[in-house]
Amino acid sequence: MFPFIVQIAGTILFVLLATQMALLLFSTARQLFVQQAQRKIEGEIFHERLAMARLQRANKEASVSHWNGTRKFRIDQKVHECENVCSFYLSPHDQKPLPAFQPGLYLTFVLVVPNQS
């Protein structure tokens, strides 16, 4: 009778240990799943913040004037539109970009004309 009790106690002990191991494995797998989900969410937040920062930078660059004062330009093309009317196509001498067009902008020209003071 005593070996039978030891066998039952051993079986119960084995079942309890197996249950504890299964719960430990389940808990670990659950933690890994949660951590993976958190990393995914953090990555999405990072990409959204990065896109927002890029947009803010682009807006700031668009609003900043590319120069103050005078700037040298060269004539790339001269087109005779009709009698007494010509169109001049200019490009910046320093090859830097021009600001985006905005209504109300104007140009002031300083012309150096040969043989005139």
Image (spheres, rainbow, N blue to C red):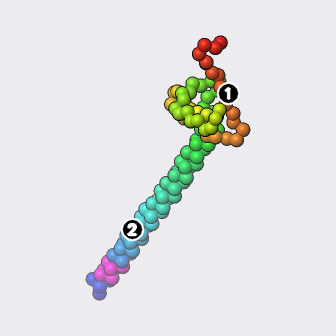
Q: Residue at x 61, y 38 (%)?
A: 81
Q: Which residues are magenta?
A: 6-13
Q: Secondary structure at mark 2?
A: helix
Q: Nearer the viewer, residue 100 or 1?
A: 100
Q: Which residue is mark 1?
A: 108
Q: Position of residue 39 (x, y in %)?
A: 47, 56
- Is residue 112 found left or right of 106 in the rendered image? left
Which corner quadrant holds the C terminus? top right
Q: Position of residue 33 (x, y in %)?
A: 45, 64
* Mark earlier in primary sequence (1, 2): 2
Residue 62 in view in this figure: no
Q: Is residue 1 magenta?
A: no
**Residue at image point 33% right, 82% down:** 8
Q: Position of residue 66 (x, y in %)?
A: 60, 32
Q: Are marks 1 and 2 in contact (CB under 8 Å)?
A: no
Classify residue 104 by image quadrant. Answer: top right
Mark 2 sits on what residue? 25
Name the kind of residue labelled 2 in the image: Leu
| As drawn, 27 above or below 53 | below
Quadrant of the frame with the N terminus: bottom left
Residue at the extreme right of the image, as rendered: 104
Residue 17 appearing in the image: yes
Q: Nearer the viewer, residue 3 or 12?
A: 12
Q: Residue 68: which disc?
A: none
Q: Mark 1 is on which residue type?
A: Thr
